């Protein structure tokens, strides 16, 4: 629909198009074509995927319980909403950020898009018709909202004022976007090393691995592989995924000097899909879907972001937009992951799991090891944090979040290199002093990421760039894996020490990249990059710098 008038722009259904993906592609093509030519490849895309993400997650749950049909590799990709938009964005060469959101009204996203200092934006909503399968003809309705201008016009439909100021609303007229640095004022982390960033950093910098056969987790698809299982965490209470999330959020708020969420806070939850409390949950489904904004995360406005294993970095980028626009005063990115039969089966069916333990960048690597835990990051303006007496030293300087890839489950070196270049450009940084890689231990994924880093290093004239990964230490934490990555990069900048990659014994041959097997002092580090990638073409790079 048109942003200025609210009139329908275009709707597509699989009854008119052969597949759901083709229907979405037709809508996106029509919406982007209405933007001025220079903006078509860079305007951000917001996809409201509440209905679809819940449907797709539950579809995987049902597939895992279907005794008459074996789980197939395609089942592990279909839960990703990005698969609806990836074909068009890849073919169009789209380089703008793309956010897959749930649990937020379209009007709130309109307000955020209108105040986020973007010259244009597109919003798309695939809505599942009640009781239908959106992959079947005639059951998925798709609509797009588009807008360009400075600022884009909002619909004039009157609406009652909210009971209190919404964080997803424009700043007062005349105030303009804020350009104060966006800083990380608190990080909370729970991993197989224990609770706290201190325990995690000590284990990582010492090159230790917490991966071992599971003591608690059990599933039909589990064959005794090494996992990053949490032990000693209080039992009872909420589901483990929810408990891990809340523990990390409590620690992050405490580190930021906050006893509770400030007014006009935005909570960005990361995970496969929202957890809807409408009954009929199968065993462990609440360890796969969710989390929910409970406990210390109650009281603010919340949105759920679902971008596979790159979700955390996408969420940080979205939070930075909200802070810069004045749509929120504080952003908390939070999530958790608990070992469960559904995510383990989806990785096992594509043969992504190493039988021993993950060894990122090792010539003998054979796959990933899954872990569990919780993570949370508090973002705010540097001036706000300093007013409370904090001395934040990590700035979120740049980001690039893309949905683009030739294949749903394979990393694309060209796309990764593009993300790296765009994130560095966004940060105004010529080169990075350290890259904390996504590197999970898969042969193809690690190789593609190394090629991309080598290519970008060659363009920037960088030699001996340190690159490492945490996933041989605590395993792959899936949607929340970006929090231990950001924690490692922030601590490296703070201490001047690059952590090694645990499990690495025979590093891949490199030209401009150094793959340390022990802690590597790098004095004077000023900027670090965090890479984060996921199924469905979700690719993101984040640039952190010292304040």
Image (spheres, rainbow, N blue to C red):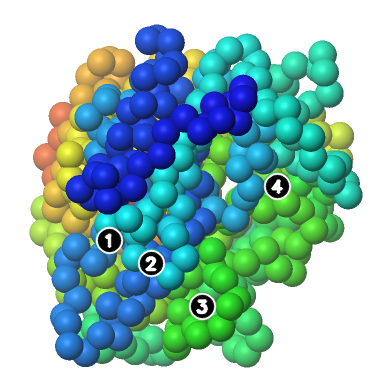
Q: Which residue is mark 3?
A: 286
Discs 2, 3 touching: Cβ within 8 Å: no
Discs 4, 2 touching: Cβ within 8 Å: no
Discs 1, 2 touching: Cβ within 8 Å: yes
How many residues crowd mark 4 within 10 Å: few (<14), some (14–19), many (20+)? Answer: many
Q: Is residue 537 left or right of residue 251?
A: left
Q: Is residue 60 left or right of residue 8?
A: left
How many residues crowd mark 2 within 10 Å: few (<14), some (14–19), many (20+)? Answer: few
Choose the circle earlier in sequence order: 2 or 3.
2
- Disc sitting over residue 132 in the figure: 2
Give the distance between the C-alpha atoms of the residues marked 4 and 2, in whole angstroms.
Answer: 32 Å
Residue 478 image position (x, y, % from top left): 39, 60
Give the distance between the C-alpha atoms of the residues marked 2 and 3, in whole angstroms.
Answer: 23 Å
How many residues crowd mark 1 within 10 Å: few (<14), some (14–19), many (20+)? Answer: some
Q: Which residue is mark 1?
A: 136
Choose the circle earlier in sequence order: 4 or 3.
4
Give the distance between the C-alpha atoms of the residues marked 1 and 2, in whole angstroms.
Answer: 8 Å
Residue 456 image position (x, y, % from top left): 27, 23
Choose the circle earlier in sequence order: 3 or 1.
1
């Amino acid at each position: 629909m048109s942003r200025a008038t609210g009139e329908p722009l275009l709707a597509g259904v699989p009854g008119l198009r052969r597949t759901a993906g083709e229907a979405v592609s037709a809508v996106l093509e029509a919406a982007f074509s209405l933007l001025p030519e220079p903006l078509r490849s860079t305007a951000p895309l917001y996809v409201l995927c509440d209905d679809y993400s819940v449907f797709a997650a539950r579809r995987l749950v049902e597939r895992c319980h279907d005794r008459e049909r074996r789980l197939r590799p395609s089942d592990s990709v279909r839960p990703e909403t990005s698969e609806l938009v990836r074909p068009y964005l890849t073919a169009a060469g789209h380089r703008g950020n793309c956010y897959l959101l749930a649990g937020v009204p379209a009007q709130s996203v309109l307000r955020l898009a209108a105040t986020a200092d973007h010259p244009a934006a597109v919003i798309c909503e695939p809505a599942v018709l009640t009781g239908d399968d959106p992959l079947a003809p005639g059951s998925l309705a798709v609509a797009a909202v588009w807008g360009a201008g400075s600022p884009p016009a909002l619909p004039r439909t009157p609406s009652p004022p909210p009971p209190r100021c919404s964080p997803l609303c424009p700043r007062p007229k005349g105030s303009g976007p804020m350009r104060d640095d966006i800083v990380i004022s608190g990080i909370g982390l729970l991993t197989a090393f224990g609770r706290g960033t201190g325990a995690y950093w000590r284990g990582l910098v010492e090159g230790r691995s917490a991966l071992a056969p599971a003591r608690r987790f059990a599933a039909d698809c589990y064959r005794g592989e090494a996992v990053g299982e949490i032990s000693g965490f209080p039992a009872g209470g909420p589901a483990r995924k929810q408990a891990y999330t809340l523990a990390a959020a409590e620690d992050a708020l405490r580190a930021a000097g906050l006893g509770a969420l400030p007014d006009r806070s935005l909570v960005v939850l990361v995970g496969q899909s929202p957890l809807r409390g409408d009954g009929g949950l199968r065993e462990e489904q609440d360890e796969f879907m969710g989390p929910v904004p409970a406990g210390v995360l109650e009281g603010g406005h919340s949105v759920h972001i679902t971008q596979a294993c790159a979700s955390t970095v996408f969420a940080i980028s979205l939070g930075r937009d909200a802070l810069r626009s004045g749509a929120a005063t504080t952003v908390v990115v939070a999530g958790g992951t608990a070992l469960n039969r559904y995510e383990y089966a989806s990785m096992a069916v594509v043969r992504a799991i190493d039988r021993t333990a993950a060894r990122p960048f090792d010539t003998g690597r054979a796959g990933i090891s899954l872990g569990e835990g919780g993570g949370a990051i508090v973002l705010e303006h540097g001036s706000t944090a300093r007013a409370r007496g904090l001395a934040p030293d990590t700035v979120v300087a740049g980001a690039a979040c893309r949905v683009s890839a030739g294949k749903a489950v394979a990393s694309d070196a060209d796309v990764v290199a593009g993300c790296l270049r765009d994130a560095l450009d966004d940060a105004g940084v010529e080169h990075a002093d350290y890259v904390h890689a996504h590197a999970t231990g898969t042969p193809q994924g690690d190789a593609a990421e190394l090629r991309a880093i080598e290519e970008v290093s060659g363009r920037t004239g960088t030699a001996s760039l340190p690159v490492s990964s945490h996933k041989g230490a605590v395993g792959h934490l899936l949607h929340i894996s970006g929090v231990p990555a950001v924690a490692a990069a922030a601590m490296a900048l703070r201490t001047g020490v690059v952590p090694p990659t645990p499990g690495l014994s025979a590093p891949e041959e490199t030209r401009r990249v150094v793959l340390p097997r022990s802690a590597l002092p790098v004095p004077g580090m000023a900027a670090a990059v965090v890479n984060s990638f996921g199924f469905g073409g979700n690719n993101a790079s984040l640039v952190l710098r010292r304040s």
